[in-house]
Image (cartoon, helix red, strand yellow):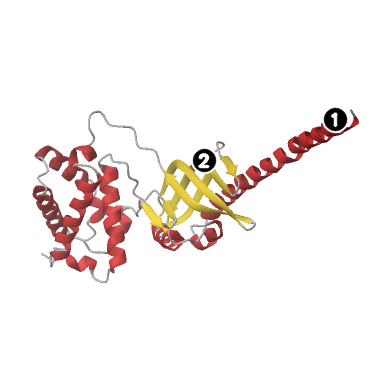
Amino acid sequence: MKNRLAILFAASLLTVSSSAFGAPKAARSSADLILRVRNLFETWQALDPEKAAPFYAKDADLAFFDIAPLKYTGWTEYGEGVKKAFADFASLKLTVGNDLRATQRGNVAWTTATWQGQLFRKDGGNMAVEGRWTGVWEKRGKEWLLVHEHMSMPLPPPPAGQSLYTRLGGYDALAAVTDDFIGRLLGDKGLSRFFMGVGNDSRKRIRQLVVDQLCEATGGPCFYIGRTMKAAHQGLGITENDWKAAVDHLVATLEKFKVPQKEKDEVLAAISGLKADIITSAGSGGK
């Protein structure tokens, strides 16, 4: 009987110890992760990838999904890409939603949250944004490091009927149009001067920004984070003739891809709204 009582007493102690010490430890881990996420978002407000680097694992093959572009592979590519994306902004304010959650399974954990932000441009403009975020963490030594991150934004409300984006063929179609259009601009002796001194990396960035802008403007699931048209073209000396030549190239591109007249007119109407911000000179231009 004494042995049985001793065993029951020991079992009771184990049960109490498990509930008293195990749960608070898990709770502390979750609290630590939540604090780390808040510190991560606060750090990104400086728009400096080097300050955010300590939160990320440095494995070369890790995938990080961003709003734009679609994906970065490895922290090095991520840090360099984000630095370019933030180049036109002076500051950023980020607020993590109250729905921030952390779940841990051993040395792996995942965190989820919605967020709101406000980007302030160097040219004086600003933009309000909101989205959702998922982070996958791994405990390495004493620190939790991000091994995967997914930042995304909700789609805009669907328009009545099919969007222009859908009718044009979606993202791949717009990317093909952009590639052909930029190729025509580069091949035009009168317009190629605007690309003089622009390196391959900068051309790729310009190409991506054009795709994102077309995608967003036509109702697609993209978000343009570049400068305003006025700021981007200021000082280039673009004339009315330059504008007309560029529009002619765009029309030729749309015709090459057999874009129907209705959709072609809608694209040109959307582009025409940018004219006042792009033409910066009253001269005759290169033609």
User: Tag 1: residue type?
Assistant: Arg
Query: Measured along the vertical axis of the image, is residue 240 above or below residue 215?
Result: below
Task: Check disc 1: other Cα within 10 Å, few if <14, some if 14-19, many if 20+.
Answer: few
Q: Is mark 1 on a helix, strand or loop?
A: helix
Above or below residue 27? Residue 276 is: below
Q: Could you tell which of marks 1 and 2 lies nearer the N-terminus?
A: 1
Q: Kindly identify which numbered label has been placed on residue 113.
A: 2
Q: Which residue is drawn at 48% across and 44% down?
A: 134
Please indicate, yes or no, whether residue 123 appears anywhere in the rendered image. no
Q: Residue furthest right?
A: 2
Label for residue 101?
A: none
Decide if residue 40 is in sight here: yes
In this rendering, position of residue 4 left or right of residue 158 = right
Residue 157 spot, x, y in % from top left: 34, 32
Q: Which residue is drawn at 13% across and 59% down?
A: 241
Q: What residue type is labelled 2?
A: Ala
Query: In the picture provided, is 6 more to the left or to the right than 63?
Result: right
Residue 4 disc label = 1
> In 3D space, how far apart are the residues under numbered discs 1 and 2 (Cα atoms)?
50 Å
Q: Which of 35 and 88 is in front in this view?
A: 35
